[in-house]
């Protein structure tokens, strides 16, 4: 038995077992041949133990048996559509026979395809299947190989700018992409190592590309309300690729995929946020959010990479199309921060979010930016004072539309502000609000007056009225005398009435002080007028020197 076992494990039998393209019947045939070969090796020992007559009979019988055994097997074409891929195996060489052809025809193996379509690094150890077949036309064992084959077929990128160019190829690729999305959606796909490598390679080839030069105006950082969005002509293909990538990220195991969904892959994905197509940016937003949620090991890297994009936008170019989508992702990320906040998160607020109020195109992403800032303050109310100071630092001077957005954001922040934090910043804050109350732009003045309609802000003002009322009272008086808009005048009178109801004595004191300041200002103005009159009279008494020529001085160097 030991010698028989060694014979069965001969190199010939090992090649038969390791050859994945051989069927079980072929393996059994090789095993039977090895057994007969072992019997022939026992011929010598049997001859030495029996008589000469018996020896001759046994020898004749063994020769008769061995003569019926075929010495070589038929050679099959490596790319035979019905046979076995022999490769470089020496045991597969030899002329073809009828028995070999009939045996090959019974094998249930689908067509082989060119190795140029399927790279060896991805298809190593896998059976390449014709990608044009449908998943319904193959067995369950072959569906995984067909899945990888279709992914590799879609790696080829075609030019979609011209619809008439390669139309047949584009339609074929589009249909294959739809089949892949349906297959993954059904839950039948298994994300093995070759499948993960193939899907990442396919997404990289189709998605990661260089965008054409931007034709937006220099003063804008992307789409504005007046500009129509631009659409990518290849979106029909890109949408299927994004759908497949989204389902892949949602279903794959993070530990198995982190080798391929690495830092380089994420960086290239972040570069796509500068796409002019809003549909693509919306897909990217969902995919990056899923990656951030599933691949926990990549979270610090994603935060750092997004910070670098914001720095480049704020301090260098002020041109990027995807800031709103990135902030929308981070609005959800910030809400999940654990308490107490890490120093890294606070630095992101101070160095990235607050400077984002500076660009002229802030209106494109202000809603998402305001939400992120509010999320930080909800996590840690002590951040209110630094945030309001940052708003005052970047407060617009001549841009009334930005000023309206800043006042709205300020109101939302003040609703969440505690008394201690409010007292730290109320003096510089209401100095700025006083200027807004006097703004000649009626929308800015009207929006600033509406702050007093907020009950939370009104309580803060009432509790600190001894400081706030004297700061803004002069602005209210100036509006009463000079402002041109009737709506602003009505709101000014309403605020004065509210102040009187809060503390009438304080209002009277402020009015007396304002009258004193006006009288002093009148006295000083009269002094300046008299001084100028004396200077003009003194100048008239001086003789005119019309005939005096200017003296020329020579300068020696």
Image (cartoon, helix red, strand yellow):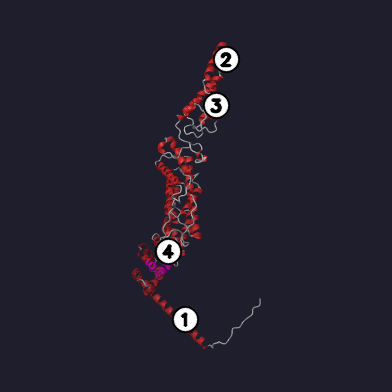
Compute the Cα span from label 3 to label 1: 117 Å
In the rendered view, does 301 fall on the left or right side of 433?
Answer: right
Task: Characterize the local packing of mark 3: few (<14), some (14-19) or many (20 or more) Cα atoms within 10 angstroms.
Answer: few
Whichever of labels 1 and 4 marks the residue nearer the N terminus, that label is 4
Residue 134, given in percent of the width and then of the height, sits at: 41, 39
Compute the Cα span from label 3 to label 2: 25 Å
Question: Is residue 301 depicted above or below 135 in this figure?
Answer: below
Q: Secondary structure at mark 3?
A: loop
Compute the Cα span from label 1 to label 2: 142 Å
Compute the Cα span from label 1 to label 4: 39 Å
Residue 330, given in percent of the width and then of the height, sits at: 44, 53
Question: Is residue 190 depicted above or below 212 in this figure?
Answer: above
Q: Secondary structure at mark 1?
A: helix
Q: Which residue is mark 3?
A: 10
CB atoms of marks 1 and 4 within 8 Å:
no
Residue 220, given in percent of the width and then of the height, sits at: 46, 61
Which disc number belongs to residue 343? none
Q: Is residue 102 visible?
A: yes
Q: Which residue is mark 1?
A: 528
Whichever of labels 3 and 2 marks the residue nearer the N terminus, that label is 3
Compute the Cα span from label 4 to label 2: 108 Å
Boundaries of the magenta span = 417-446
- Residue 313 located within the stretch drawn in magenta: no
Which disc number belongs to residue 47? 2
Give the image quarter of residue 417.
bottom left
CB atoms of marks 3 and 2 within 8 Å:
no
CB atoms of marks 4 and 3 within 8 Å:
no
Residue mark closest to the camera, 4 vs 3: 3
Compute the Cα span from label 4 to label 3: 83 Å
In the rendered view, does 453 fall on the left or right side of 270?
Answer: left
Give the image quarter of residue 178.
top left
In the rendered view, does 524 fall on the left or right side of 53?
Answer: left
């Amino acid at each position: 038995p030991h010698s028989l076992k060694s014979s069965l494990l001969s190199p010939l039998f090992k090649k038969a077992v390791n050859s994945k393209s051989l069927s079980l019947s072929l393996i059994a045939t090789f095993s039977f041949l090895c057994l007969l070969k072992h019997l022939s090796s026992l011929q010598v020992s049997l001859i030495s133990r029996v008589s000469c007559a018996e020896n001759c009979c046994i020898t004749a019988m063994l020769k008769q048996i061995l003569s019926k055994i075929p010495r070589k097997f038929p050679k099959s074409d490596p790319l035979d559509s019905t046979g076995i891929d022999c490769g470089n195996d020496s045991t597969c060489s030899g002329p073809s026979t009828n028995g070999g052809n009939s045996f090959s025809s019974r094998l249930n193996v689908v067509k082989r395809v060119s190795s140029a379509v399927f790279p060896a690094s991805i298809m190593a150890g896998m059976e390449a299947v014709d990608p044009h077949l449908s998943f319904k036309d193959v067995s369950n064992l072959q569906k995984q190989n067909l899945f990888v084959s279709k992914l590799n077929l879609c790696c080829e990128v075609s030019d979609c700018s011209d619809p008439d160019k390669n139309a047949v190829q584009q339609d074929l690729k589009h249909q294959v992409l739809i089949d892949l999305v349906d297959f993954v959606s059904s839950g039948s796909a298994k994300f093995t190592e070759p499948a993960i490598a193939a899907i990442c390679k396919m997404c990289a080839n189709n998605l990661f590309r260089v965008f054409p030069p931007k034709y937006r105006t220099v003063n804008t950082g992307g789409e504005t309300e007046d500009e129509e969005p631009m659409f990518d002509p290849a979106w029909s293909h890109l949408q299927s690729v994004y759908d497949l990538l989204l389902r892949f990220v949602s279903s794959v195991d993070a530990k198995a995929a982190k080798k391929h969904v690495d830092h380089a892959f994420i960086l290239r994905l972040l570069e796509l946020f500068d796409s002019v197509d809003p549909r693509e940016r919306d897909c990217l937003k969902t995919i990056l959010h899923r990656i951030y949620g599933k691949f926990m090991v990549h979270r610090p890297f994603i935060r750092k990479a997004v910070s670098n994009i914001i720095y480049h936008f704020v301090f260098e170019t002020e041109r990027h199309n995807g800031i709103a989508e990135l902030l929308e992702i981070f609005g959800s990320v910030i809400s999940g921060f654990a308490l107490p906040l890490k120093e890294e998160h606070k630095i992101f607020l101070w160095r990235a979010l607050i400077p984002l109020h500076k660009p002229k195109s802030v209106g494109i992403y202000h809603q998402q930016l305001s939400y992120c800032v509010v999320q930080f303050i909800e996590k840690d109310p002590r951040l209110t004072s630094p945030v309001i100071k940052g708003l005052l630092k970047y407060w617009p001077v001549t841009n009334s539309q930005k000023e309206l957005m800043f006042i709205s954001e300020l109101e939302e922040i003040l609703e969440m502000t505690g008394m201690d934090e409010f007292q730290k910043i109320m003096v510089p804050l209401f100095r700025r609000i006083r200027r807004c109350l006097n703004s000649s732009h009626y929308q800015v003045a009207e929006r600033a007056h509406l702050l007093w309609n907020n009950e939370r802000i009104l309580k803060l003002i009432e509790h600190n009225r001894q400081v706030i009322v004297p700061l803004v009272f002069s602005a209210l008086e100036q509006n009463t005398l000079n402002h041109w808009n009737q709506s602003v005048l009505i709101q000014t009178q309403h605020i004065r009435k509210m102040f009187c109801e809060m503390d009438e004595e304080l209002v009277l004191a402020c009015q007396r002080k304002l009258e004193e300041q006006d009288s002093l200002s009148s006295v000083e103005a009269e002094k300046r007028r008299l001084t100028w009159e004396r200077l003009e009279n003194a100048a008239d008494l001086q003789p005119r020197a019309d005939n005096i020529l200017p003296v020329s001085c020579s300068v020696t160097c």
